[in-house]
Structure formats: C-alpha cells, structure tokens
Amino acid sequence: MTRTGNTGMVVTNVNGVFHNNFFKISFDRSKYDKNFIVHYLMSSYCQNIIMKFAGTSTIPDLNHGDFYKIKFVNIQRAEQQKIAKILSSWDKAIELKEQLIEEKKKQKKGLMQKLLTSEVRLLGFDEKWEKVLLKDIFKRVTRKNTIGNTNVLTISAQKGLINQKDFFKKSVASSILDNYYLLRKGEFAYNKSYSNGYPKGAIKRLNHYDSGVVTTLYICFKLIDSSENNAEYFEHYFESGLLNQAITKIAHEGGRAHGLLNVSSEDFFNLPIQIPSYKTQVKIAEILTCADRERQLLEQELEALKIQKKGLMQLLLTGIVRVMC
C-alpha cells in the first residue's frame, strides 16, 4: 500500500523490491482473506482514517505507527470470503461497463474519421464537399466582459467549457474580470495549451451555461450564419482532432509562450477545411451525437454501480449488515 503522495492505494500479486514509501502488508492467511483486506483498506471508511492520519500537507504521509492503529472488524474468515465475493462481483460489473465505454469511444472515433472526412458517404448525401477557410464560416468573438459576469470558464477534456471552480476546486482567475472575453451559449473557444488527448490544444463549445468569461489567451469564435452551417457538426469536427495537422503547420518556431502553442488568430482563421452541405452536416451531427448519448448512458450506469458498491462496502465492511455463510 502506498504510504506517501497518493496515500492508501493497494496493489496485490506483485513481486519485486519496494521503496519505503510503500507498506508491505503481511497477515495470517488462516484467519484473514486477502480480498477482504483489500476491499476493507480501499473502503471510504478506512480511507478516511488513513487520510486523517496522513495529514493535509502537500504530500500526505502515513507512518507505520498510525497504520497499525487502523482497526479491523473481527469476523470469521468464511464471512470475510463471502463479503469479498459479493464486492468482487460489483468490481467485475464495473470493469465490464468501463470496457464497454472504451469500446463506444473507439467506435465514435472511427465514425468521426469516416464521416467527417467524406471517406464514407451517407446514402442520399453524395454532393461534392467544398474547400473553405475557417474565416469563411466563423468570425472571431472579442467582446469584453462589460456586464460583470463572474462565471469564469475553463476547458475540460470531458465536460467542455465548465466553471473554473468546478474544475480546479478553486478560482485561479484574476480578481478583475473586465478584460476577459464574454462568451455566449453556442460559441466556441480554443485553448492553445496542450492537455491529455489534445496535443494541439482543445476547441470546445459553450453548452452548459447561457454565458461565461474566459481568459483572452483563448481564441473565441462563432458561426457567421447558423442557417448555412451547423454548430453541432463543427463541435464533433473540432473534437475529432482532424484540425491538428493544419495547426501544426501554423505553430511558429519557438514553440510555446506561457505553455501555449504559438498560434496567431490570423493564422488560425486561415486554416483550410472541407465541408459538406448544411443538410449533410445536420445528418452527420445526429449520428455522432447519438453515439455520444449511448456512451453517456453507459457512464451514468457506471456511476450508479460505483455508488451501489460504495453503499455495500459501508454496510458489509462495518458489520451493519451481516451475510450468511
């Protein structure tokens, strides 16, 4: 079990030499079941105790003396095994659901690659795609926050443009927000900073709020005419990463400034893309949005399983509910 940093993580069935930042846990196997001990140590009840002992410093540290103060429920090994088996069945269900979610993500990625590049054409939608520049369909948004909006947004890979406090659990914005850009629902923002899964930065659309403000380091933009081009289509297009190769070409020598790709607004809006008709855009967006909804439903089911397991652990590992052996 990890002793410092990410304190309280437990791994099993490993051979090797360990740094003293880990605990090697040994026990009488005639009295205790290994899987039960793992579930017990990873339960919220036990983790709360561990974190209390480890402290709230930048790098939590659990010493040996405090580790040995952790109390275990005194039940027969047969009941331990039964409890471990019940909880392991939930672990298996969670694992299978996670695998299914990953498969859905791969399927969506494949769909985007085929549909957004015209590699695969939809039946009845075989018109010629047009080559345009981003500035032909989008215009830059530079409106300043003159209305005192305090909904400071940041870009999350999973949730898009979300409130900064929800993402960082604290505010990292300037106390004066007058010079921030004011975004309205349906508009886009490009964060030029590298993040996991977004090697050339991330472009997200504001979906969760009517308005919000972002740092002027972002490039913000909106459709010139929503009756000619579909915002949902471009939301999927930007998410696909198909713009990355073109962005690489305009990222100037010298790399990054303040951790950001050195991409100018002028070069960004001169990026070329190929687009289908509005009708085709809408149809492709419907297909990809449907794929997103399937994944989101699975993620909701996954969260429900995790909550159910947490509840079971609270009941079974503390003796509130006993099982028949």
Image (spheres, helix red, strand yellow):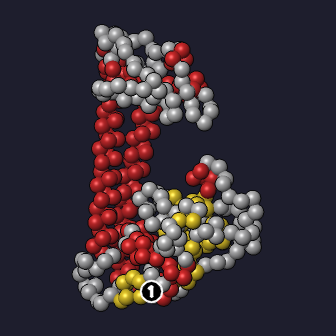
Q: Nearer the viewer, residue 256 or 61?
A: 256
> Helix, strand, or loop for circle 1?
strand
| Left or right of residue 100, residue 164 in this image | right
291 above or below 40? below
- Mark 1 is on which residue type? Leu
> Residue at left 49%, top 34%?
6
Q: Quadrant of the C terminus?
A: top left
Crowdedness of circle 1 by 10 Å Cα count: few (<14), some, many (20+)?
some
Residue 240: horizontal and vertical position, in percent?
38, 68
> Residue at left 47%, top 20%?
318
| Left or right of residue 12, residue 41 in this image | right
- Give the residue at mark 1: 133
Q: Determine which quarter of the picture holds residue 315.
A: top left
> Residue at left 59%, top 62%?
258
The reply to whether residue 285 is visible in this rendering is yes
Q: Nearer the viewer, residue 75 or 22?
A: 22
Q: Nearer the viewer, residue 3 or 122?
A: 3
Q: Determine which quarter of the picture holds residue 79.
A: top left
Q: Quadrant of the N terminus?
A: top left
| Left or right of residue 104, residue 312 in this image | right
Q: Residue furthest front?
A: 254
